[in-house]
Amino acid sequence: ADARELRVAPGAPPAHPSNSHLYQKLVEYLPEESDGALTARLLGPEVASLGQMKDAIQSQLVEVGNLLPLYFPADLPNMALAGELALSGRSPQAMAAAMTEYMVTCDTCQTELKDFGMVYLGSGSSDVYTLLTKEPIETADDLQGVRLRSGGAPFSRWAENFGAVPVNVSVLDTFESLSQGTIDGTMASVADLLSFRLIDLVDNVAVMEIGTYHATSDFTVGEAAWQSLSVDERAALARAANRANVDFTYRWGYEMPKEAIQAAKDAGIEFVEPSQELIEASNAFAEKDVQNAIERSRDQFGLSDAEERVNRFLELVDKWTAIVEETGTDPAKLAEKTQSEIWDKVDYASYGL
Amino acid sequence: MGALARLTNRAMNLTAVLAALGALVMMVHICAEIFLRTAFSAPIPATVEIVSRYYMVLLAFLPIAWLERRRGMVSVEAIDFLLPAGVKRYWDVAISLLSAVIYAGLAYTTWLVALKNYATGTFVMALEWVVPVWPTYFLPPIGFGLAVLVTVFRAISLLSGQDDAVEEALGV
Amino acid sequence: MSLEIGFYGIAALLVLLLLRLPVALALIAVSFGGMAAMLGWSPAFGILSSTPYSFVASWTLSAVPMFLLMGFVAYHAGLTTGLFEAAKAVLRKVPGALAISSVFACSGFAAVCGSSLACAAAMGRIAIPEMVRAGYRPSFACGSIAAGGTIGALIPPSILMIVYGVFSETSVTQVFVGGVSLGIMTAIAYSIVILLMCWLRPDIVPRRPVDADNLSARTALLRIWPVLVLIALVFGGLFSGLFTATEAGAVGAAGAIAIAAVTGRLTWKALKASLIETLTTSASLFIIAIGAAMFTRFLGVSGLSNFISSTVSGADIGYLQLMLIVVLIYLVLGMFMEPFGALLVTLPVLLPIFETSDINLIWFGVVVVKLLEIGMITPPVGLNVFVIRSVASQHASVMEIFKGVTPFLLIDVVVVAIAILWPGLILFAPNLMN
Ligand code: NA
Ligand code: NA
C-alpha cells in the first residue's frame, strides 16, 4: 500500500537546528518507526513561518508543525506557566524532558490543547542562557544601567533585579541593535554568537547560568491529521518525534554552544568569570522568582492552582536532572529513557482525542 | 439604497480619518520611545507589539474601502484600448462584482478569525507586560466588508446607467 | 500533480491580470483556488483568513508608512522644491540633468531608507511632477524613478540584506558594505542610460534643463538646507546608534513635520495631502504584498519554486553557467513574486550549492538583492512600478511605466554581468574590513 505522507513544517530555514536536527530527523525516522506506513514532506518557512504556524495547523495546511506556545498565552496557559520558570533551567535535556512529561501527564494541559485543535508530541530546550556583552560583567555593579536584550518576562525580571534595563528587541534585530548601541548586550544562548553573527560585535561572554528557553512544542499535530491515523501510526509518530526531540535538544543545547565557544575563543572573545557574589545572587534570585511565576500564572494566565502546578513542574525538573546526570547526554540513550518514562505510558487510542 | 450608500460613505470617511490618526500617533509613539529610552533609560513598554498589532493593522485594513472608492487599487490596464465603450461598461460591472466576491470571502473568513480571538481574549506578552490584541482582529473584516459595499454599489450604478445617484452618494 | 497546479496557477494569474482585476485580488483569488485544488477547502480558507493579519502585523514593515509620510511631507510642505533647482543648477550643462539628479537623489535617499518601495514612493512624489513639467515623457519620468528606487535596497540600510544575512549566516555589515559599491554602480549605469536616451531620443528626454539659467549653483544649494538637515537628522541618529533603521522612518517623518513647521511651510492642506497619500500608498501596497505572500505560500506548497531551483542543483556545471541559471531563476520568480518570498523560496536550495561551489556568500548577498530588485520593475507584478502608479496616477498608466522602465532593465542586465564577471568590484570594500 502507499505510505501516508504527512505535511510537516519547522517554520525555520534549513540552517536552523529546528529544521536540520528536528524536522529533517523526523523525515528520516518516521518511515523507520512506522515500517514505511508513514512518510513526511517538509514544507519550508516560505509556506508556514513560526508566526503563521497556529493558523497553518488549524487549517490543515500543515499537519505537524513547530509551534511557539509563548505566542498564545491566552490559549495555552500551562505552556505560559512553564515559560515563566525559565530561570529554573540548568540542564537542557532535563528541562526538555520535564516539560514533555508535564504536558503529557496533566489533564488541563490536554484540555487546553484539545480546545486549541492540536495534539502535543514533546518539547526541546535551548542551552542555559548567559550574558553576551560589549563590556565585561564581573560584579552586580557592572550590570547597573546596562541595556540587555531580553527574550521573555523571567529574563527581564532577572535583569531588573540587578539594575540592568531589559530591552524588547526581536531576535532578528539583535545584530543591528547591538551594532548601533541601542543595546549593550543580550541574555541569550552562546550559540547566538554564530547563529546571529554576534561574534563580530560581542567582546565578552559571562561564564554564568541564567536560564533556559524550554516552553516549546516541537511537534504539534493538527486534530484532523491525528484522528486520521491508526493507533499504531500514532504510536509510531510519537516514537519518531521523541527521537528527533532529543536529537534537537542535543544539537541546540550542547553541540552548538560548544562550537560557538570554540569560535569565540578563536576570535579572541573574553570569557569572564563573574564574582562569587554575583553568581550566588543570581541563583538566589532564580529561586525567589518561582514566586513571581506563580503569581503571574494565577493573575494573568488564570490558573487558580498555579502553586501546585509550578511545584509539579519543578519536581519533574529534579527527576529528570537526576536521570540525565546518570544517563549522560548521549541522545540515543536519553531517547530510550524518555520513550519508556513518558511515551510508552501513553494510551494512543485516547491520547489527544 | 441612497441612504445605505450615504451611510457607507460616512463609515469610509471615518475609517480613513482613524487610519490617518493611527499613522500620526505611531510616529509620535516611536519618537517618544526613542527619546525616553535614550534620555532616561526608560523605554515605553510593549512599543514593538503596539506598533505591529495596533497601528499597522489599522493602517493596512481600515482604508481599503476608501481606496477602492478612489479607484486606488492597482491593476494592469493592458486591454482597455481593445474594448468598445459599450462593452467596457459591462466589463467594469463584471470586474466590480468579481472584486466584491473576493472581498466578501476575505471579510467572512477574517470575521470568523476575529470571533475566535474575541472568544479566547487573545493577548501577547511583551516582557512583563500583557497586551490584549483581540480587538484589532476586527479591523480586517471591517475594511473588507466596507469594500464589498463599495464594489457592489459601483456595479449597481454602472448597470443602472445612473452614475450619478449612487456614486454621488458615495462621494466619488 | 501539484507541480501542474503550480503552472496552471501562474497561467490563471496572467489571465486575471489581463482582464484588469486588481493585482492584489488576482493574487488572492489564484492562491485560494490553487490551494483548494491541491489540499482542499480547509487549507485554502486557512490561507485566506490568516495571511492578511499575520503579514501586516509586523514591526519591520512599520518603516514603510513612516518613510512614506516623511517623503510626502517633505514634498507637500515644499522642503524638496529646492532639490531640483539645485540639481538643475549644478548639472545645468549636463543633458538629462533632472533624471540624472533624481537617480542620484534616489541614491542619497537610499541611505536613509530600508526598502526600495519607500524610496521609490518618496522620490516619485518629489521628482516626477518636476520632470514632467520640464518636458520629459511621463512614462520615462515614472520609469526612471521606479528603477532608481531599486537603489534603495542596495545602499544600506536594507531590510532585504538583513534578512539574507540572517538566513545565510553571513555578516550583515559586510553585505551592507558590498551593497554600497553595487548601488553606486547602478546609479552610474542608470545615468548612462539617461544620457543615451537624451542623445538618441530628445523627444523623450529633453537635452537641457528648461529654466535653470538665472539661478546660481550657490544660491540653489543654499535652498536645499531643509533636506540636508533632514538627511543629517536621520543619518546622524542612525549611525550614532540613537535608533534603528526601522525606527528611523518615524524620526524622519517627525523631522520633516518639525522642519516644515519651523520654516513656516506646514499648512493644514499640506499635512492633509501627505496623510492621504501615505494612506493610499501604504494600503494599496500592503494589500498587494498580502496577495504576494499568499501566492508565495501557494507556489511553495505546489513545489514549483523548489522544482525550478532544484533542477539546477542536479546539473554538473561551471561558475558562469551556474550564475546564468541563477540569474534566470530570479528573473522568472521576480516576475511574479515579492522579493522576500522569492528569497525565502530559493535560499534553501541555492546556499548549499554555493557552499560546495566556493561562491562567496557576501558577494552573493549583494547580487541576490540586485536580482530581486530587478523583479520589482519587471512585469506583470512589479511592485515599484505599482507604487509609482499610485503616487503619480495622473501621469502614466501601469503599461506606460513598464515601458519607461525597459531601458533601465536592459542596463541592469549589464550591471549584473559585470558583478558576475568581476566579483572584486563588490568584494574589495568588505575585504578591507578583514
Ligand atoms: Na537603503
Ligand atoms: Na516583477
Image: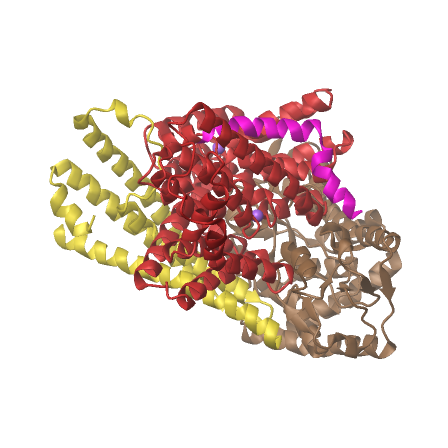
Point out residue A287 in the picture as x, y percentages from the top left corner: 74, 76
Q: Residue at x 57, y 75 (%)?
A: A298
Q: Overall secondary structure of the magenta stretch?
A: helix
Point out residue C17 in the picture as x, y percentages from the top left corner: 37, 30
Any part of residue B91 in sight: yes
As drawn, the chain in yellow is B
The answer to whether residue B119 is left or right of residue A80 is left
As drawn, the chain in brown is A
Q: Residue at x 34, y 62 (%)?
A: B18
Point out residue A306 in the picture as x, y percentages from the top left corner: 61, 74
Quadrant in which the N terminus of chain A appears: top right
Residue nearest the observer in this picture, A224 or C104 = C104
| Quarter-of-image position of residue A166 | bottom right
Any part of residue B121 in sight: no
As drawn, the chain in red is C
User: Which residues are drawn in magenta?
Assistant: C405-434
In reply to whether residue A241 is colored magenta, the answer given is no
| Quarter-of-image position of residue C427 | top right
